[in-house]
Amino acid sequence: MTLRLFNTLSGQLDELAPADGHSLRMYACGPTVYDYGHIGNFRTFLQVDVLRRFLKLTGTPVRHVMNITDVDDKIIRNAAERGIPIGEYTPQFVDAFFDDLESLRVERPEFIARATEHIDKMVALIQKLEAAGAAYKTEDGSWYFRLAAFPEYGKLSKKDLSGIEDGARVDVDEYEKDSARDFALWKAAKPGETAWDTPIGRGRPGWHIECSAMAMEFLGESFDLHAGGEDLMFPHHENEIAQSETATRKPFARHWMHVRFLLVDGKKMSKSEGNFYTLRDLLLKGYKASAIRMALISVPYRHQLNFTFDGLVEATNAIDRLRTFHVRLVAASLPAGTSEAMQAAAEKARVAYFAALSNDLNTADARAPIFDLVRAANTALDKGEFLAGDRDAVLSVLKDFDAVFDVIEDRDAGPTERAVAWAAQEGREIAPELLARQGLTDTEIDALVAERTQAKKTRNFARADQIRNELAEKGIVIEDSKDGVRWKRK
RNA sequence: GCACCGGUGGCGAAGUGGCUAACGCGCUGGUCUGCAAAACCAGUAUUCGCGGGUUCAAUUCCCGCCCGGUGCUCCA
C-alpha cells in the first residue's frame, strides 16, 4: 500500500516513502505556547495525526519530531505583562497543549523539542551560515540571513521574488539589513528581555532557525517530510529551506505537506470576529471530544473546512451510529460459521477504505465504505444471516478504521471532566446542559433501568415511560433489544 | 492589484469524459415495538454556480463571467 500525498514542493501527488527504506522521518511545526490552542491549530495537528496513524497502520514506523516554540515576541510580551520570567509563563500552556492533544486523541510525536533547550544548536547553525557567507550581524547585535545567498528562494511557495528591489528603503524598522527581504536568525537582547549569552552575542533565536536546527538535530540534514499549516509555507518554511540548504548544501525535506486553514461560519477565525474557539470552549459547551476530532478530520486536509456547530452535531450523530452498531455487534449472540456475503462485504470495505486514505488521505472518501459495511451488517443481523465468523471480519475493519479515526471506542468522559474541572478552577462558564448531564452515576442509571424493566414486566407502562423520560432529560437514551436493555449517554 | 482554492440534494461532503452522482446528518412515509429508541426499507439532486466552446458524449476538459474563501505581514 503506497501513500500518494500532495507535495507542495513538486506541486503534485508524490509517493511518500521513507528514504532509508524503514521509518519515515518527519517534522511538523508545533505550537507557540503563549495561549490555549484553538481549533484551527488542532485541525492541523489532527491531520498530521491522520497521516502518522495511516503510515503506522500500513506498516511504516514514524520518527516524528514536533517543536514547541517557548520563546518569541508574544511570549516575552505576555510574560512581561504579568511580571514573570518566560520560564514561568509557558509551562501552563505547554501542559494545556498536551492535555488538549490527549483529549483529541492526537498521538504524541516520538520527539518533542523545546526551543529554549536547543539554543546551542541554533547558534551553531548560524555560525555555519556565517562561515558560508550567508549570515551577517548588524550594529545592534542581531543576525540576518542574506537572501542573495540562496538563489532558489521561493521554490516552495512558488514566489518569484526577483522583482523585489533591494534599494527601496521599505522598512524603517529594519534599516540595518542589507536587503529588505533578509530575515532574522538571531535577535539581539533588548534591556530586560530574556536572552542567552552565546558566542554570537547576547540575544535569542529567530523563529525560523529554531525549526531548521531542531529538525536536523533529530532527523539529519535531509529527511522525508515536513508538515505544517498552510500559512507557514511562506515565509517560515521557505526560510527554513534557505537556511538549512545553504548550511548543508543538501536538500532539506523532500516532501512538504500543508494543511489548509479552517473557516468558522464561513470566515477566517479571529478573536475580533468573535468566532474564535479553543478546544476547551467547545468541550464546555457540551460537545464531545470525539465529535470535534471527527469534524476536524472528515474534510480532507487540502480542503478548506468550514467549522460550524451544526457540523459538530452531524459528527456526533455519525459517531453515534458507529458506536451503536459496534455495541450491537459485540453483544450479539451469533451462530458459528461465516457467510460468504458478509465476508465479501467486509473485504470490499477494507479495500476501499485503504484505497481512499492512500489517495492523498481522502478521509471523506474513507468514511463511506465503513458506513456501507455498517448498513450491510445491520441488515444481515436483522435477518439472522450474520454469523460469528463475520463478526471477526467486521470488527477487524472497524479496528483499521479506528486506528486512524479513533472515535468508535467511547472515551469522551475524560476530556469533558477535565474541561469542567479546569473551568471550575478558572471560573469559566460551563453550559447548563452539560452540568445536568453530569447528574447521574452509572449505578444510579442501572438501578433506574432495572426498575423500568420490572415495571414493563408488570405492564406498568406509565411508570416505565416516566423513568425513560426522566433519563432522557439527563441525556440518557434507552434501547430495548433482543439481547437486553442498553442505555447510552447522548 | 497579483496569485491560489472552491461553488454538487435541506446541510456537510466524495467522485467521474459515457454505468442508478458515494457516504454522513436532517426530513417524510413504512416495517418492527405496549409506545419509543435502535435497525431496516422507500422517498428526498432527471442534475452537479451561469454563459459559451471542444467531443459521438461534460458535472468532469478549455474560455469568459458571477459568487464565496484564502495567501501576498505575526498566525495552525
Image (spheres, coloured by chain):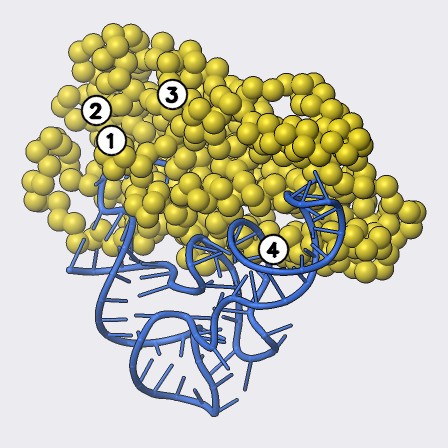
Chain colours: A yellow, B blue
Q: Are marks 2 and 4 on the same chain?
A: yes
**SS at badge 1:** strand
Q: Tell me which amino acid carries mark 2.
A: Ser
Instruction: Looking at the image, tell me whether mark 2 or mark 3 is earlier in sequence order.
Output: 2
Looking at marks 1 and 3 on the same chain, the residue that comes earlier in the sequence is marked by 1
**Residue under disc 2 on the same chain as residue under disc 3:** yes
Q: Which residue is mark 2?
A: A142
Seen at 59% across and 27% down, the residue is A470
Image coordinates for residue B55, horizontal then vertical, percent:
45, 90
Callout 2–callout 3 Cβ contact below 8 Å:
no
Chain to which the residue tagged by mark 1 belongs: A
Q: Residue at x 48, y 15 (%)?
A: A421
Whether labels 2 and 1 belong to a single chain: the reply is yes
Q: How many marks?
A: 4
Q: Chain of mark 3?
A: A
Q: Residues within 10 Å of mark 1 (few under 14, many from 20)?
A: many
Q: Position of residue A345 (x, y in %)?
A: 75, 58
Residue A184: which numbered mark, if any? 1
Crowd class of label 4 (few under 14; some 14 to 19; many from 20; radius 10 Å):
some
Vertical position of residue A48 compared to residue A12: above or below = above
At label 3, the amino acid type is: Glu
Nearer the observer: mark 2 or 3; the answer is: 3
| Residue at which label 3 appears | A429
Look at mark 4 in the image and give the residue it sits on.
A368
Report whether A270 appears left or right of A391.
left
Viewer-side label of 3, 4: 3
Nearest to N terminus: mark 3 or mark 4: 4
Question: Do tag 3 and tag 4 residues touch (Cβ < 8 Å)?
Answer: no
**Res B7 quadrant in image:** bottom left
Task: Answer whether residue A426 is visible to the viewer in this image.
Answer: yes
